[in-house]
Amino acid sequence: MARLRAPGGCPWDREQSFDTIKPYLVEETYEVLDAIDRRDWRGLAEELGDLMLQPVFFAQMASEENKFRIDDSLDAIAEKLIRRHPHVFGEGDAKTADDVKRRWDEIKVDEKKDRGEAPRGILESVPRNLPALVEAQQISSKAAAVGFDWENPDQVLEKLDEELEELGRARASGSRSELENEIGDLLFVLVNLARFLKVDPEQALRRTNAKFRKRFAHVESHAKLPGSSIEEMEALWQEAKARDD
C-alpha cells in the first residue's frame, strides 16, 4: 500500500482520502457477512483479505500525515485485550459470559476516567451512523443495562399488541408522519423482543431475506412474471417452502 500511494504508484490509490475509502469499508464488511451466511469458506478467506485491506489503507494514509502507524493500532488492540481480560491474563475472576461482559464494561468506564474524559450520556457511545436495526439493538441494550427495561418477554409482547393497535389508528388517520412513527415504534419493540429471546435481530432478518430470495427464485423460474395470478405464485411459493421444510 505504501508503494501504491507513493509517487509513481497507482493514480487511483494516490488520490483517495479517509472519506472516499469509508464506503468500501462498509461494502467489504457486508460481503464478509454474506460469505459467512452462505458458509462459503473459500469466499470468506478472500473477503476477509479485502476487509483487512481497508485498515491497511486507512493506516497508511494516517502514517503519511504523521498521525499514527498501523503498529499503533495493533499494539492498542493487543493491550486492550489483555487489559479487559484480567480473568485470563491477570488475577481476575469470571465464570460466565455475563461476568466477562459486565467486567469489560466496568474496565471500559475506568479507562475513560483514567484518560480524563468527561462522562457522556449512556447512549452516546452508540454510533449514530449504524444500520438502524443494529442501532436499536445497541441502544435498547444500553438502557436495559441500567434497569430501564421490561421484566419479561410477556410484557414486551403486550407492548407489541399496543403498538399494533396504534398502527391501526395511524392507518385510519391517513397521516404519513404518524404511520412512519408507528412503524418505527413497532420495529423497535420487535428488536427488544429479540433481545429478550436472545436472538440477534440483524442475523434473523438476514436469514429471512435469504429464505425469501431462494423461494422467490423458485416462483420466478416456474411462473410467467409479470402475468401469473397470485394464486399460481402462491402455489409455487408453498412448493418452495415445502422443499425447505
Image: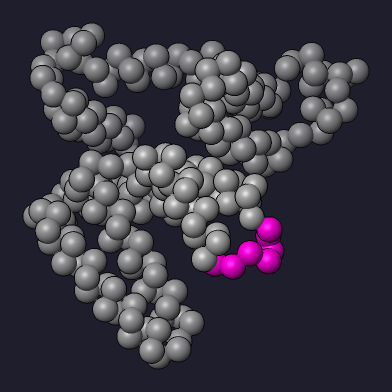
Does 109 appear above or below 229? above
Q: How many tags in the picture?
A: 0
Residue sitting at 17 percent across and 14 percent down?
Answer: 87
- Where is residue 49? Give x, y as percent: 61, 18
**Residue 124 visible here:** no
| Residue 220 highlighted magenta (yes or no) | no
- Where is residue 33? Give x, y as percent: 50, 32
Quadrant into which the C terminus falls: top left
In the depicted view, which residue is nearer to us: 129 or 50? 50
- Where is residue 148? Give x, y as percent: 16, 56
Left or right of residue 10, residue 192 in this image: left
In the depicted view, which residue is nearer to us: 15 or 72? 15
Left or right of residue 218, residue 24 in this image: right
Residue sitting at 55 percent across and 59 percent down?
Answer: 233
Q: Magenta region's main secondary structure?
A: loop
Left or right of residue 191, residue 63 in this image: right
Residue sitting at 22 percent across and 74 percent down?
Answer: 162
Which color mode does the image show? one colour
Quadrant into which the N terminus falls: top right
Residue numbers of the magenta segment: 224-230
Residue that lies at the very extreme toward the bottom in this rendered image: 173
Residue 244: quarter of image: top left
Left or right of residue 70, residue 1 in this image: right
Residue sitting at 64 percent across and 55 percent down?
Answer: 223
In the depicted view, which residue is nearer to us: 54 or 206? 206
Does 236 appear above or below 111? below
Does 45 appear above or below 151? above
- Where is residue 228? Give x, y as percent: 63, 64
**Residue 195 visible here:** yes
